Amino acid sequence: MKNRIVLISLSVLLLSLPWLGFPGYTLWVAFVPLLILQEKLSREKNRKGKPRRFFGYAAVTFLVWNIVTVYWIKNATWIGVVAAFAVNTFISTVSFMVYHYVWRRAPRALAYTVLVSFWIAYEYVYINGEISFPWLILGNGFANTVRAVQWYEYTGILGGSLWVWIVNLLVYEAWRKFRACRCAGAFALPVVIALTPLVVSWAMYARYQEAERPVTVTVVQPNLDPYEEKFVLPQWDQARLILSLAERAPADADYIVTPETSFDYTLWEENLPDNPLIRTLREFMRTHYPGAQLIIGATTFRRYGSKAEASATARTNSNIDFWYDVYNSAIRIDTASVSVYHKSKLVAGAEMIPHYRRFEFLKSLSLELGGVSGMLGVDPERSTFASEDGTQVGVAICYESVYGEYCTEYVGKGAEALFIITNDGWWGDTPGYRQHFSFARLRAIELRRSVARSANTGISGFIGQRGDVLAKTGWDERTALTGTINLNDRLTFYARHGDMIGRICLYTTLLSLLYFIAYRRRKKDYLVD
């Protein structure tokens, strides 16, 4: 029993370290202890003479991994943390148990194919599902090791997941051979497979040169506690605070960016230009920064004349006679015009009810987490903000920046840089906000777009197209940070094609399972080891 606990603990440790600020290289061997335990239990017999069950050990491993790395969700919602633990643990365990089932009944090569393809296919489906919290996608583990994954511009983070699994299985096979023959050369192949993409990435990093197309951006970090201040402090007081920080921008600034829901004001979209707050902000820009654009986070509303005109996410109540949508929005303001983008990758439970069209009666149960409650409205597709000279930027709002393929849609619409506005204060001073910032480095590589990030509190900053952190703020710091980033209009392979690896693994999983079923039915001798 002691050996089993050691193996589980070792897998948990190696899986967790990259999300706690360490390099991602531990992922290369993180599953090896679990694979060893799986084989060990399959060889042992219980009192009834049957192989010992593996399910509980796999479930404990993945549950503890979740607890160690994303426990901070509890600071925002206990329901959210329980749901995240349950869903993540379940699907990870199912992936391993499908492999375990095939491994005991079919050739090892087929079992490995099922394991790798099934795991990455579930990551792909999870990323694109309405119930989604893809924080622990294996490829995200290299967010603090960006020089190792410059080839994400071709594969995205699922390429990192594939790399992790291939190396783990090769190391596991090498360990089995070494145990049998004590031949150290058995580890040569996994070392080569681990290091080859690494060397290629280092070369790509050294050779990559950003085109000199600079813009000057100031990101504002107001540092308002979301529980004690942000939604209690009068909005005009917040506006004065944010504008006082924005005044730290240089006279030649091209953009001034404020965090998600900086202005939780009653902003009806049908008359935005006439709203007193918007008029104040436009006057501020006209007076101080006539050549710049102000991009703010805000809560906005859209009114409908009747239920027939309303969207599926619209709401009403007994005190009014109309329907309306609530949005978590980004608003672009300059001296001539105002435009709006709505956050559309919403947090399940906090901002939306998954599959809400089937469960409209559950809208009222949605948690309050961000200054608005209930089911938020969304845009059917991404859009960008364009300046008078034609420069376009995409603005990802908080959670949207975690999704690589989703962010390709901004680039597909012409975005030459990516701005991220967020409120990471919900999680407190935990690994959560640091993880969220580090994922932005992966978006920079995948899209080869510079990133300017404005957070309510830590971490705001600037990231170059190689994923380098150019400048950043600290936690619990009220400030404004100015930096220069380069624009880029080149489309990477990943920006054009998205998560191809995920789609390929979906088909591979189906074919592998069909092959396994046919193998079990026919039991042809030539397929047996």
Image (cartoon, helix red, strand yellow):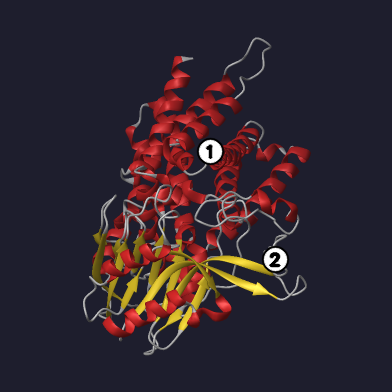
The residue located at (41%, 69%) in the rendering is 447
Q: Quick one: label 1, few (<14), some, or many (20+) residues within 10 Å? A: few
**Residue 157 location (% of width, % of height):** 45, 56
Q: Which amino acid does label 1 sit on?
A: Trp
Say whether marks 1 and 2 touch (CB < 8 Å).
no
Mark seen at residue 474: none
The residue located at (28%, 63%) in the rendering is 205
Q: How many numbered discs, if any?
A: 2
Horizontal side of 521 relative to 458 (left or right) equals right
Along the line of sight, the residue nearer the viewer: 14 or 202: 14
Marks 1/2: CA–CA distance:
33 Å
Position of the C terminus by quadrant: top right
**SS class, disc 2:** loop
**SS class, disc 1:** helix
Along the line of sight, the residue nearer the viewer: 26 or 437: 437
**Residue 143 location (% of width, % of height):** 36, 52
**Residue 509 location (% of width, % of height):** 64, 50
The residue located at (31%, 45%) in the rendering is 23
Q: Given this view, does label 1 or label 2 mark the residue nearer the observer?
A: 2
**Residue 311 location (% of width, % of height):** 70, 69
The residue at which mark 2 appears reads as 320
The residue at which mark 1 appears reads as 78
